[in-house]
Structure formats: structure tokens, C-alpha cells
Image: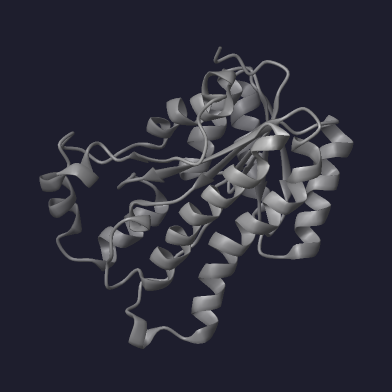
Amino acid sequence: MFDLTGKVALVTGGNGGIGLGMARALAQAGATVVLAGRDAAKSEAAVQALVAEGLRADAIEADVSDEAQVGRLFNTVEQRHGALHVLVNNAGITVRKQVQDLSLGEWHQVMDANLTGAFLCCRAAHPLLRRQGGKVINVGSMMSLFGAPYAAAYGASKGGIVQFTRAIATGWAPDLIQCNAILPGWIDTALTRGAREQVPGLNERVLARTPAARWGRPQDLGGIAVFLASAASDFVTGTAIPVDGGYSIA
């Protein structure tokens, strides 16, 4: 039920952090994973690490906020692998500023990478996914649910991801495509290490509020990614599932 042998999974922002954690788990379940990212050298290093583990992986350079690059990305996936079964929209950035300090350019930068990028990838993926049915996994955030003064653009983009996920889930159900969102909590990545450096006391507050009493690790997202990519979730769609060690219930 959880076997992904013969499946092709594209993970945007899959060359590090949460994206690589999910990609590794999908590959361990049998999928061929394609890592899409702007940093070609980083993506190639990630591919080499996965291949060294006996997994099937490929990398394609792409900026998901650029419509032309997204088009080339999916054309390349089809040319190299002949199909697409799973799309993981994980690529994202943040700018840690309060609203009054954000420039319009910074607002657009975050929205374009986090929300518009997911839209462009979903639109490009649809013709491939509908051939046999498939899975879309959108990576939101706990900021899809909560507010934070320094995460106005990021939170707005990730809140939008949840509603976008619901729209796809209803619209693409006749095509046998399920779409769900994952809402990571505080996961130890380069992105959140930057937050700990910029936000005094953040580490202590996260540990105090999280029932699991630790920060998450990228591999903690692996199980939910495999579930949502596999036949085990064929009757699950339109959900937004926190993976946060209990942070959102405390």
C-alpha cells in the first residue's frame, strides 16, 4: 500500500532541509525522485548522496517563480522519465520583517516563491498527473494557522497554500488526483537556524511549548510524505496535516 516502486516524484526545493528529507523517504519507498532547485551544485550534491545510498534520483535546475523555467522543468521531467506521479511543492523562502518594514519587492519575492510557484507547478503538472491519477503535496507551515509579527508575507503565502490545496482537491478529484498539505512545525533546517539567530529566546520558547520537547528533523516529514504520495491515501484529499510534535495543540 505504501510502495512507490515505478513512480516518479518531483520535489521542488528538494536539495536540502525538509525537501531533501521528504525526497529521501519517497526514494526509499521505491520512487525515482527529481530534485528541482535554483542551486544546481547543491542539487547535484544531494543527488549524489541519494545515489550513494542506492536510491534513484535526478536533478533539474529551475526557479519555480519563473513561468518559463517551470515549463521547461516539467518538459524535462517528461522527456527524461516519461511520466509524473507525485508533485511536492516545497520550495519556499521568507523575509523576517514586520509589515511596516516590508518593501513591495520583498512581499512579491516571498509570495512568488511560496504561493505563485506552487500554482505554476500545479498548472504545469496537471496534464502529466491526469494521465493515470496522481498526488500533489503542498508544503504549508504552522504559520498557515498562527500569526507572527515577523512573518507577514510568509504567513500570508502559507495560509494561501491551504486554500489553494482545497481548491485543487475539489477541482481535480474527477481526474483521480488527490491534493493535500503538510504543515511543518519548528524543524531544524538552515531556514529556522536563521530564525533562531534573529529572534531572541525562540529556541527556548519552542522547546517549552512543544509536547515532544524537541525541534523536528527533516526526516520527521518522511512518513507523512510517503503516506500522501502512496495508494494508502487514495481517499484522503483537501487536508492540511500538522507535523509539529504537538506544537499546534499545546
Q: Is residue 155 above or below residue 245?
A: below
Residue shown at 23%/46% (left/top)?
A: 248
Question: Residue farthest to the left?
Answer: 208
Q: Quadrant of the N terminus?
A: top right
Image coordinates of residue 51 in percent, x first then y, are 65, 25
Residue shown at 49%/77% (left/top)?
A: 107
Image coordinates of residue 60 in percent, x first then y, are 74, 46
Query: Relative to 89, is 207 on the left or the right?
Result: left
Image coordinates of residue 196 in percent, x first then y, are 26, 59
Residue shown at 69%/36% (left/top)?
A: 174
Q: Quadrant of the C terminus?
A: top left
Q: How many marks?
A: 0
Question: Residue farthest to the right?
Answer: 79
Q: Is residue 25 above or below residue 109?
A: above
State which quadrant residue 11 falls in: top right
Q: Is residue 56 above or below residue 130?
A: above
Task: Please indicate, yes or no, whether residue 14 appears anywhere in the rendered image.
Answer: no
Task: Please indicate, yes or no, whether residue 173 appears anywhere in the rendered image.
Answer: yes
Residue nearest the viewer, comparing 25 with 236:
236
Image coordinates of residue 57 in percent, x first then y, are 69, 30
Query: Relative to 178, is 195 on the left or the right?
Result: left
- Asked which colour scheme the image uses, the reply is one colour
Residue shown at 34%/58% (left/top)?
A: 143
State which quadrant residue 44 falls in: top right
Query: Relative to 227, is 50 on the left or the right?
Result: right
Q: Is residue 108 above or below residue 162?
A: below
Residue nearest the viewer, comparing 10 with 246:
246
